[in-house]
């Protein structure tokens, strides 16, 4: 059985600890928070472990997960190195999506195997997270010696691990943010423009929601170039001009930036004349 310490028993920390405990393959050592109240709440949620607030009291563990906020990781790693409580040869990982294992450098110089383990999953509500975690993708990066144990942990808690190339975390996290956050922004833009057409909110929600779901399904099944339909894919610069004429300046700027990228995606289907006409129709507004 592998022993697991959690430093930062918040949303992610207590969820991972509970899943690890429930798998029957991990001994939960400590659940450490800044406040005793949080540590006790984490212990109650997990149903195992010792509630702690002082890093110097951490028991020995095969894996220590730093599930503290991103901005705290480097400081906690430095404090752990100063306290000298992490054994050389054991594994320490953090859960930041954008931060590299290098955030744990003070521990790495002590012979600790340092890595990051980022579940591409929302832990907004720990009870719901635990119930729905199965199949979540978990990105691993860092010291090769840490990876087998962390691949095992990710799989044991129901996740699907994959390894990122060194230096890939920022691009990895940018990709997730674009896929998730910008989808929301796109929906907001479309809903705002639908309001201009006089569509009732519930009608717009049904029309746009249905179309967005269908388009995403098509993109995943066929690939972006084949899934693309609409005026830009047809080289219809006249329709593009009609759209732009009714947009606010702010929405028009977004429409042009996204339109230019869409035209590049459609380029192989368009004649040179169509591409030129689209480029002119999508020229950014004069500042
Ligand atoms: N939440 C998600 O959906 C999600 C998803 C993927 C990755 N992550 C990553 O997971 C990590 C944790 O995020 P979270 O959302 O779980 O954070 P969170 O809910 O805010 O919990 C943070 C925990 O860390 C403790 N803490 C803060 N500073 C500390 C310090 N200096 N020393 C010891 N403990 C400290 C807090 O204790 P107190 O309560 O006592 O202050 C709290 O228990 C971050 O790296 C985040 O990027 C989160």
Image (cartoon, rainbow, N blue to C red):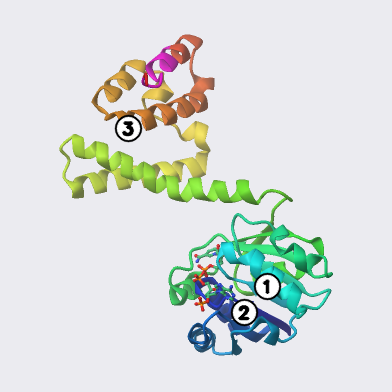
Q: Sequence-wise, which precedes: disc 2 or disc 3? A: 2
Helix, strand or loop at mark 2: helix
Where residue 76 sits: x, y (%)? 65, 71
- Report if the CB atoms under discs 1 and 2 are less than 8 Å apart: yes
Q: Which residue sits at x=51%, y=21%?
A: 267
Farthest residue toward the top? 273
Where residue 3 sits: x, y (%)? 71, 83
Q: Which residue sits at x=40%, y=20%?
A: 282
**Mark 1 and mark 2: span between their CA atoms?**
7 Å
Q: From the image, which quarter does the C terminus lie in?
A: top left
Choose top left, top right, bottom left or bottom right for residue 26. bottom right
Magenta stretch, residue numbers = 277-285
Crowding around mark 3 (Cα neighbors within 10 Å: few <14, some 14 to 19, many 20+) is few
Q: Is mark 1 within 8 Å of ligand 1?
A: no
Crowding around mark 2 (Cα neighbors within 10 Å: few <14, some 14 to 19, many 20+) is many
**Mark 3 and mark 1: span between their CA atoms?**
46 Å
- Which residue is under mark 2? 20
- Report if the CB atoms under discs 3 and 1 are less than 8 Å apart: no
Q: From the image, which quarter does the N terminus lie in?
A: bottom right
Where residue 143 sits: x, y (%)? 78, 61
- Which residue is under mark 1? 153
Q: Is residue 18 above or below residue 218?
A: below
Choose top left, top right, bottom left or bottom right for residue 101. bottom right
Residue 219 visible somewhere in the drawing:
yes
Helix, strand or loop at mark 3: helix
Q: Which residue sits at x=27%, y=30%?
A: 248
Q: Is residue 35 left or right of residue 157?
A: left
- Which residue is under mark 3? 250
């Amino acid at each position: 059985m592998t022993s697991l310490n959690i430093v930062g028993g918040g949303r992610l920390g207590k969820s991972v600890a509970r899943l690890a405990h429930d798998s029957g393959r991990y001994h939960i050592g400590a659940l450490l928070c800044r406040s005793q109240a949080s540590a006790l709440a984490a212990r109650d949620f997990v149903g195992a472990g010792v509630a702690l607030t002082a890093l110097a009291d951490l028991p020995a563990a095969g894996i220590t997960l730093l599930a503290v906020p991103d901005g705290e990781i480097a400081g906690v790693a430095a404090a752990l190195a100063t306290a000298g409580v992490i054994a050389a040869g054991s594994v320490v990982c953090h859960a930041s999506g954008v931060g590299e294992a290098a955030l744990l450098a003070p521990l790495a110089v002590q012979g600790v195997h340092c890595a990051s383990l980022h579940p591409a999953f929302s832990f907004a509500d720990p009870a719901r997270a635990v119930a729905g975690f199965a199949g979540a993708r978990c990105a691993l990066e860092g010291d090769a010696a840490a990876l087998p144990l962390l691949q095992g942990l990710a799989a044991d808690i129901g996740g699907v691990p994959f390894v990122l190339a060194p230096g890939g975390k920022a691009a990895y996290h940018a990709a997730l943010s674009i896929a998730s956050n910008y989808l929301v922004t796109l929906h907001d833009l479309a809903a705002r423009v639908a309001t201009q057409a006089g569509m009732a909110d519930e009608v717009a929600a049904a029309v746009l929601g249905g179309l967005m779901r269908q388009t995403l399904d098509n993109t995943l099944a066929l690939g972006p170039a084949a899934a693309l339909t609409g005026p830009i894919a047809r080289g219809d610069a006249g329709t593009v001009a009609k759209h732009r004429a009714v947009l606010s300046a702010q929405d028009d700027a977004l429409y042009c930036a996204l339109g230019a990228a869409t035209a590049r995606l459609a380029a192989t289907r368009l004649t040179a004349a169509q591409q030129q006409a689209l480029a002119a129709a999508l020229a950014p507004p004069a500042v």
